[in-house]
Amino acid sequence: MTSKTARGAAAAACLVLAAAALRAGAQEPGAATTRPVIVSLSAEKVGAEPKSFVPMVGDWIIAQDDGRKVVMVDGRKWKRGQPAGGLADKAREIYGARHEDFIDNVAAFAYFPIAVAKGIDNFENGELSVKFKMIGGALDRCSGILFNVKPNGDYLTVRFNGTEDNLVLWTFNSGKRTFVKRGADNVPLELGTWHLIRVGIHGTTLTGYLDGKLLIEYSLKEPVSGKVGLWSKTDSMSEFDAFTVTRAAK
Amino acid sequence: MRNSTMTGRALATMVAAAVAAAPAPLAAQGSRARCTMPDTTKEWARSQRAWLDDSRHDWSNDTLRLKLVNAAGLDASKPMPLLMGWTTLDAPKKPDSAAVALLRAGMATRGAQFPTRSVVGAAGVSAVWSIVFGDSALEAGVMRRTMEAGLGEAFETETAMLEDRVRVRASRGQLYGTLLRANADGTLAPARIEDSAHVDLRRESAWLPPLKQSVCAATAGTSRR
């Protein structure tokens, strides 16, 4: 490679990284926008922990799938319900001074791997979606969208579980997991194939879709307001791609 | 139907021969079969051994454990042998016993105590697996209960093998490749596997040896355990 070509390649790489950073939502477009923000993985390093998501519980890595970078939660290594390494630092990174409640609560939920999307603050109204592919898990094969994540570690999730073939809304409050609403139909999905979960939040109305099919409709007790991300359970192995946040126009 | 009956007979003969055969070192059997046998020094075997270790005597219901172990004809005074990661669908359904009735009642009653590791120890859990083996309804019920039992309570290897059986019976692809069928030439091969690209990844998570090695063990006539 000549030096001129190398300089050109470096400049191009910088442009790609800058574009990726914008897409990742590090500097989110105006809050009133309805333009979808897709968390880009292009600047991530395969085999390393994701930088665009902050793993709080479980083993999360960047994997390669068919030449594309994806986020993978790997329950093989994580059998004992431990929070991710460096939890305190990570909690401080996303919640600043209020991180200690978050740590206590997350430790109580340590059977449920979560990774919080960086730079997506205070999602209230709109849609969240993610592509997921189940790979394995002897006890669970879960892939879910995490939202309404509070500084004390409480949150909501809509997840698909391949061992039960269902889409379910769960709440996690003060160290207690509570079933809220099961999808209208069971949908057996093949492992190793990509599918899409989409959650709509409009005021207190929640809708949950699997591959475009409406399965959950529910009225929440209060409006949603908090961070968002990815969710999994125990020994699940799943891949995630194209995590998308579309805020409703105000 | 005729073919599958013949296949069933051939397999039953093979399994009976395997059980009757005097145990030989795994590597020697593999050499006879010209394939690589499961390596019992690897992580999958260490994980199985650790889970099957009952030396802490930390189960809560000794009476139930004894009932189950006796019903399954297991010797709980020794550690349970490792699972080599293969079964066939030809295991005959055993006649209902008191142990089967007990399991059925446990599954029919919501909130009833189920014989998991903290209740009956590893030998008790393995006994449940042996008792339900071949009974399609019980296999499915026990699989559900063990999946719900949580980490450490179920022997994930057995749960995985049950799930393969339940899925194949429901005409779905198996996930771990543990269920083998005989080809026309008498060789054994896994029934259809869903997402076969990741099968060994899933097997690793369920403490199973690589698929090729389990097929080798079955071909060499090694016991399932």
Image (cartoon, coloured by chain):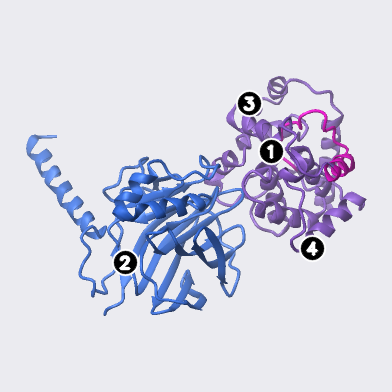
The subunit carrying tag 1 is: B
- Identity of the residue furthest to the left in this view: A4
Q: Residue at x 61, y 48 (%)?
A: A138
Mark 3 residue element: loop
Q: Earlier in the sequence, mark 4 or mark 3?
A: 3
Dot 2, how many residues are within 10 Å of its Cα: few (below 14), some (14-19), or many (20+)? some
Q: Which residue is mark 4?
A: B109
User: Where does the magenta region start and end?
Assistant: B63-87
Q: Specify the amino acid type for callout 4.
A: Thr
Q: Are marks 4 and 3 in contact (CB under 8 Å)?
A: no
Dot 4, how many residues are within 10 Å of its Cα: few (below 14), some (14-19), or many (20+)? few
Residue B147, percent across and down?
A: 66, 52
Q: Which residue is mark 2?
A: A122
Q: Which chain is blue?
A: A
User: Are marks 1 and 3 in one subunit?
Assistant: yes
For this view, does A132 lie left or right of residue A26?
right
Q: CA distance from mark 4 to mark 2?
A: 44 Å
Q: Are marks 3 and 2 in contact (CB under 8 Å)?
A: no
Q: Which residue is mark 1?
A: B85
- The answer to whether residue B75 is magenta is yes
Q: Specify the amino acid type for callout 3.
A: Asp
Q: CA distance from mark 1 to mark 4?
A: 31 Å
Mark 4 residue element: loop
For this view, does A136 lie left or right of residue A85?
right
Q: Residue at x 45, y 51 (%)?
A: A104
For residue B39, the mark is: 3
Mark 1 residue element: loop
